[in-house]
Image: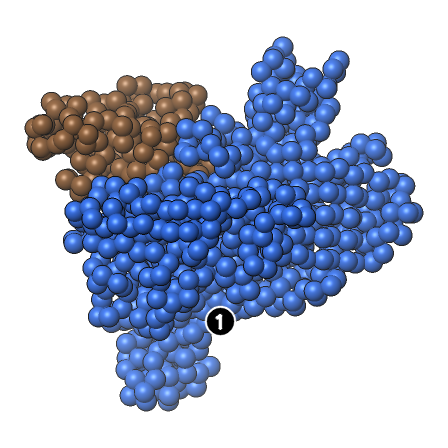
Amino acid sequence: MGTFNKVVGVDGVRRDTVDKLTGKERFSGDYKIPGALALAIARSSEAHALIKNIDLTKAKALPGVVRVFTAEDVPGENSYGIIPITKDQPMLAAGKVRFKGEAVALVAAESLEVAREAAALIEVEYEPLKASFTPEEALADGAEAIHDKGNLCFEHDSLMGDPDKAFAEAAVIVEDTYTTSAIEHSYMEPESGFAVMEDGVVVVTVSTQNPHYDHADLCRLLGLEEDKVRVKQATTGGGFGGKLDLSVHSYVALATLLTGRPSRLAYTREESFAASAKRHSFTIKYRTAADAEGNLLAVDAELVADTGAYASYGVAVAMRAAVHAAGPYMVPNSRVYSRAVYTNHVFSGAMRGFGVPQVALAHESQMEKIAAKLGMDPIELRLKNALKPGDKTITGQVLGDSVGIRECLEKIKAVRDEWGAAKGDDDGVRGIGVGAMLYGIGNTGVSNPSTAQIRVNKEGGVTLYTGCADIGQGSDHVLLGICAETLGLAREDIALVRADTMLTTNAGATSASRQTYISGNAVKAAAEMFIAKAVEAAAKVSGSAASELCFTGTAVKGPDGELSLLEIAESLRAEGRELEGEGYFDPETVPLDHHTGQGKPYSTYGFAAQLTLVHVDKATAEVRVEKLFAVHDIGKAIYPQGVIGQISGGSAMGVGLALMEEFDHTSDKNFDTYLIPTVLDVPDVEASFIEHAEPTGPYGAKGVGEPALIPTAPAIVNAIADAVGVRITSLPANLERVHSALQLMGGK
Amino acid sequence: MFVEFTLNGEKVSAEVSGETTALALLREKFDLTGAKEGCGVGECGACTILVDGVAVNGCLYLAGKLDGRNVLTVEGVGGEEALDPLQQKFMEHGAVQCGYCTPGMLLSAKALLLKNPKPTVDEVKVAISGNLCRCTGYTPIVKAILAATGEGK
């Protein structure tokens, strides 16, 4: 077998970096597409209304307009959505609109100016319906049904042990209600893509996290066989969950299919804000019971999420939030009831953490309250209850070996000791806060496999084929690293074909922090099969025993010399076979029981703890995060600089979640009012990791993309509480909320 | 109107309308697509270019105003064979993830270093505070810029 090559754990340089630094990298909007039609979308002015009539006369009459499309032009089923049981979203509204900004008609024209002018000339007659803008309104008697099935999109129950008994016997009970806000992903590249017809195939090149899911939904919408649609992932300028949903894809595909001409569409930022998914806002009622020594006895939580007008990932968010409701702690009794509720807001979908950042606010605030009641150190309380290998989670899953939360907390404790007591100054007060989390890697309680292939190429080298979309986080580099390590090569020796539905097979979505673990395993399996196949074929050609042969990465060496990969490939081809390794990996899961929520939702978990030091200005109520220390158990860092980059970037997003970001559906149109952190808003993140190798992970790796963000907001809120003595339970902890807290603070 | 200006060291000219932005001109006429549109309202900085050494938002700056000026885009900062020290340090420090903000970020840093070769950390932060990045958390970018000045690691 290959020599141990030590690519894993060494940074190297990503192959996209130089082009991104010199301006050569082409995002989808950077291509010249000769003859492309420009598209523009007419969007609903109403949040909830029946469409009585759409008058296209003026739009069609405008010179330069090629065609105008409405729902009637959609050739296939006009409903899509990532989760099979909730494909409830039309690409063009059919008879009814459910949020302001929903696509009603599509214009294709010779220029963008004409397309936009024509879209503005489309006259839609609406019959307004009563709209609901909160889950409470939507679930109230007399609420107008947003969908035929009603306004409850999804509910999930979880029960373990006897929580009522545990609460009755508890020494300490703390309870509170926590709320979080809708958040805009704010990837720097707005949605963009183009389509062309090639030999009867609609080829869509698009910014996406999800090429194979996109492909399936496009086939459904267009009514085409799967070989008539091809999705190629363009270089993608961030996603964070927001590019899992279809956006421009279906419009460029429809226009190109029905006109035969290339077409392109890039959302403006305003359009992106109006029509793309948001993070679910949550209301969380949470009770925790503990004994007098601080051992957690029970959790009782009720979660309600605003999933907006369409389901998107609402089911996954509500379920994952429930599974993670107790945090990284051993809790023997629990009851969790979680719902995703339709409203007439733009749809909520996946956003970094799938509901876990929201519940982390609750469980981490509760830990502080228990510690205060018992007079315990909050880190000691967490250590006392932190999950260990062999412990049961609240879904009854017995954890495996890779459970690094205790070590994370020990590190946090040491850093806190280094920082010393938080001292205020003339302007304000300071506080230190902790946040901790666990995060299941991969999709919740369902099969979510990845596949990969490795083939010898014409130059005699190897090419890795993966359906995995690198959205900027560096999964290409991770997968190439795993491939190189296994084959005994350098990353630079390997060609890569990725995220093209004609050339690669499904790797699943780039979401749920799953690509390193799941696609990494598929790549590793492919490489191992490639080696085995090469050695077996070489043995046959050379007449040597396989045990005498050694795979070198470029050849197979034996006692009588060596055979190149090309020679081996040729010998296999003579038998009608290919020198190819195929890899498949599906994490072992057990679906959650519908009534009790018990099962094995994930095969492994990431863990983390973060520590922040904040300064709260007494006059202005401004909160500055002065220090942020993060430690994450990621199993094994395949690409350490990438891990640090994820933690640093995730923490910054966590600062936004904690202090700044609250998407106002009526007024936020762009970054002039919707503020995300600038460099002046975030501290220098001290990011670190520990490596509790996961036995089922590729070289021990788990995942880090979403965990990076999850502990940050709780750590900041807890630090504010430490500083001012008043707990903020609604995010963001903006100036108004902190100001109120300061007023309550009184004489501290 | 007709404008003549220096673009990445070369004399160029173009006929532009009064509404054309510098960003549109550079991307559409000169196929310099390094500068990106991220928001179109001058908030995100993805369109940052240098005009006479000063960082401006290409999405707001009118093309007509380029006449007689010296314009630098990311394509003129340094190519693959001869990376600028800023590009080199961005690479070494992992300051590039999705890359959409990168050209603008580089040019804001470039403008700073042109007038202040030894900036403090705070000066670096102020210089890039008009450039949004959602991927990196800024920490690697600040380190990279400081490293390019010979400070930091």
Residue type, numbered disc 1: Tyr
Classify residue A459 as left or right of residue A149: left
Asked whether B50 or A414 is in front, the reply is B50
Residue A58 image position (x, y, % from top left) = 25, 46
The residue at 72%/19% (across/down) is: A744
Element under disc 1: strand
The residue at 12%/32% (across/down) is: B16
Asked whether A411 or B139 is in front, the reply is B139
Sort mark 1 into few (<14), some (14-19) or many (20+) by Cα contacts within 10 Å. Answer: many
Chain identity of mark 1: A
Classify residue A10 as left or right of residue A513: left
Q: Quadrant of the C terminus of chain A?
A: top right
**Total number of numbered discs in the rendering:** 1
Q: Colour of chain B?
A: brown
Please say if A253 is above or below A676. Answer: below
Q: Who's blue, chain-wise?
A: A
Residue A212 image position (x, y, % from top left) = 41, 64
Asked whether A601 or A421 is in front, the reply is A601
Residue B46 image position (x, y, % from top left) = 33, 35
Q: Quadrant of residue A281?
A: top right
The residue at 37%/24% (across/down) is: B127
Asked whether B92 or B42 is in front, the reply is B42
Evaluate whether residue A410 shows in this view.
Answer: no
The residue at 50%/59% (across/down) is: A88
Please say if A349 is above or below A258. Answer: above
Q: Which residue is mark 1?
A: A584
Q: Quadrant of residue A548?
A: bottom left
